[in-house]
Image (tube, helix red, strand yellow):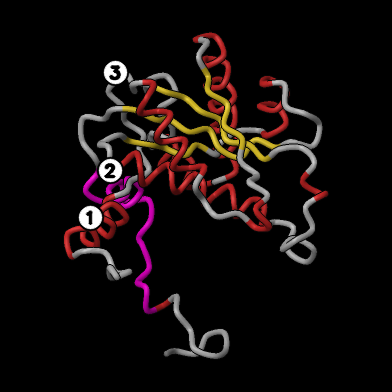
Amino acid sequence: MSSPRYSDAERAAIYRVIRERRDMRHFSGGEVAPELLAQLLEAAHQAPSVGLMQPWRFIRITRPALRQQLHSLVEQERLRTAEALGERSAAFMQLKVEGIRDCAELLVAALPEGREAHVFGRRTLPQMDLASLACAIQNLWLAARAEGLGLGWVSLFDPQAVAELLGLPADAEPVAILCLGPVTAFYDQPMLVEQGWAAPRPMAELVYTDHWGESP
């Protein structure tokens, strides 16, 4: 009987791809081969989901005009976000927040209609559909990084505007615009850290024992 534990090299690769995953904003054009794109989406489809509801829908954007319209919607929200940030507005406007026009592939990840029919695991926590979709996006992210491709999650948009643009059903909801494709290089640290926008907190501050706020 083989050991359920992976080999040293396999475990190292898994931890490496988790450690080196980055939310990418800078893309170098190029393309993603159709068979590789299918493989990456299959990795997303292997994600866990509450009650096996599989609440992920991926819309591949192939029309240049549609890509430009999505970019315009993101730009509108970028300006609104800058205004809401007050004194940090100017610093925010210096950040590159998306790669929609530069990435090889553009996907929109959405929650489907009819989610209220799924009660298993959602009766008291209905947001678990969103958690399940996030797991699928993370699978896609890690698989892309292992293949040497960058992926960026863009959340600066009005969901209703994107839903109308893409013809989503009334109770479906877009959650992420995903930029995918070749990059010149991966950031050494998360981009917001490199740009001085934020600093990560150490893990020790985020783990409690028994009760909220109690240290291990």
Who's the residue at 37% across and 50% down the image? Answer: 197
Residues at marks 2 and 1 touching, judged by CB atoms closer than 8 Å: yes
Q: Is residue 174 above or below residue 69?
A: below
As shown in the figure, which amino acid type bears the numbered disc 3? Answer: Gly
Is 191 a magenta residue? Answer: yes
Q: Position of residue 213 (x, y in %)?
A: 52, 85
Who's the residue at 60% across and 54% down the image? Answer: 49
Q: Nearer the viewer, mark 3 or mark 2?
A: 2
Q: Helix, strand or loop at disc 1?
A: helix
Q: Is residue 82 left or right of residue 50?
A: left
Q: Is residue 8 above or below residue 207?
A: above
Question: Residues under labels 1 and 3: Cα distance?
Answer: 26 Å
Chain part drawn in magenta: 187-204
Q: What residue is pinned by disc 1? A: 13
Of callouts 1 and 3, the N-terminal one: 1
Q: Which of 86/128 is in front?
A: 128
Q: Single out the residue that lies furthest toward the front.
A: 1
Q: Helix, strand or loop at disc 2?
A: helix
Is 28 a magenta residue? Answer: no
Q: Is residue 214 left or right of residue 18?
A: right
Quarter in which the N terminus is drawn: bottom left
Q: What residue is pinned by disc 3? A: 30
Q: Position of residue 169 (x, y in %)?
A: 77, 29
Q: Which of 58/102 is in front?
A: 58
Q: What residue is pinned by disc 2? A: 146
Who's the residue at 32% across and 35% down the image? Answer: 150
Q: Position of residue 84 (x, y in %)?
A: 60, 43
